[in-house]
Amino acid sequence: MFSKKTVMIVGVILLIAVNIIILSVTSTRYPSFGPGRIAIALTAPFQTAVVGTARFFSDIWQRYFMLVGVARENEKLEHALRRSREENHRLEEVALSNQRLRQLLEFQQKTARRVVAAEVIGKDPSPWFKTIIIDKGLEDGLTKSLPVVVPEGVVGQVIELAGNYSKVLLVIDQNSAVDALVQRTRARGIVAGAIDSGFLFKYVLRKHDVQVGDAVVTSGLDGVFPKGLRVGEVSGVVKRTAGIFQEVTVMPYADFETLEEVLVILNPPTHPQTEVP
Amino acid sequence: MTYLFYALVCLSLVVLETTIIADIAVFDDLYDLLVTFVAYLGLYRSIKESIPVIICVGFVMDNLSGAPFGLYLTAYLWIFAGIRFGMRYLQVRTSALVMFVVPIAVFIEQILFAAVLFMQTPSGILAPLFSKRLGGQLFWALLTGPFFLMFYEVFDSRIEKWAADRKAERNGL
């Protein structure tokens, strides 16, 4: 009755129509049925694992670069901080050095003597002996026995010279001796270095009044140190029942542990000549 | 080359102990570091090679220090002689005794210093201070001395090997 071709065309048209109808019906509501759930339940964990792993690696990759960037930035910041600290430290040093040099300059102007400033470049290798090396020598006009001072007080005297360097025997060395006076009472004695620390004020007569806290100054009679330079402060007085002298200990005004710059007096006093009429 | 190494080591030690160490309070009781080098020379090097070095070092130290001139030189020569003498009877190099070489050397030096100081200062004042300082120095010497000796030995042997290799190269061996 119908040809085979006609039947085929009608069949295809029907299939398309049914398909359209089904699609139009299913598109209006969400289908949820057993096999679908099972499929999801089976595949989802793998999906989760794969996606999770991918994300993990992706995160690592991204964070690595991010961390590298952060690390670099951190390094830069640390470097900048270090430079700032160094700069700060340098400026503090400059400020302190400036302060010290100002003091030296003021002292230099007050003393009205020809002085040369020198820097301490080395200290005695032995704790038993007290010397320093300064960066001024023969070429700067220094000679042996010149007094070395700081604004706080006497430091020592030049004992050896080289072209641009000198060795200074500190007054706290046990081989050092300075003729000195108690400022208040004019009691005279010899300030000698003590082996442990500080000075011993030797040969002060018992009859002289010396008290703790008295200032000791140079007498100028040793021919090395100018008169009136500060030496130290009396820290102890012992008057024994016997003997003609009293035992006096003196704490130096100058801090020998932190000596950095000193002044060498180029025209020290000479012994006053007594004129015979 | 060896003498250059000696000069470099001695110079470094002298500069170190007169500048940096002298300014650090922790090292107030540190011993004379050159003693370690003199001890090394006594232990490992020949008399002919060591004496000129010791004389030079002693001379330099005597000039830098306020100590009576010749004290360091005397101390170093005595240390050297003492170690050489000890080595005639004891296997110092290859035994644990090597640990005590620097402290003994420091002890010899300090005894000589004390002898000079006792001549100038009443012993009542000096003795307590001396024993305290000696104790501190021996402690440091015991702690650091062996490392110094190891350092010198390693570097010196490397330099000698290097010099021998260069010589062999020059001779076409």
Image: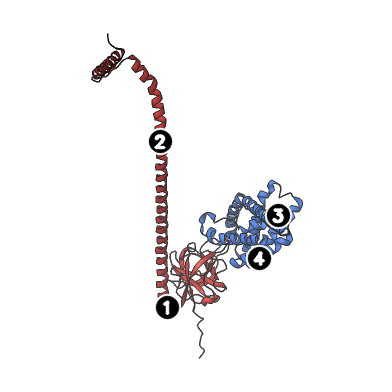
Chain colours: A red, B blue
Left or right of A95, for residue A15: left
| Label pair 4/2, CB-CB below 8 angstroms | no
| Within-10-Å neighbours for mark 3: few <14, some 14–19, many 20+ | some
- Residue A32 position, x and y percent, is 29, 17
- SS state under label 1: loop
Q: Is there one chain holding both mark 1 and mark 2?
A: yes
**Camera-nearest residue between A209 and B26:** B26
> What's the amino acid at mark 4?
Cys
- SS state under label 4: helix
- Nearer the viewer's eye, disc 1 or disc 2? 2
| Label pair 1/3, CB-CB below 8 angstroms | no
Left or right of A168, for residue B90: right
Which comes sooner in the sequence, label 4 or label 3?
A: 3
- Residue A222 visible to the viewer: no
Q: Dot 4 falls on which chain?
A: B
| Label pair 2/3, CB-CB below 8 angstroms | no
From the image, tell me which residue sits under label 4: B56
Q: Residue at x 66, y 49 (%)?
A: B99
Residue A2 vertical placement versus A51 (above, below): above
Q: Is there one chain holding both mark 1 and mark 3?
A: no
- Nearer the viewer's eye, disc 4 or disc 2? 2
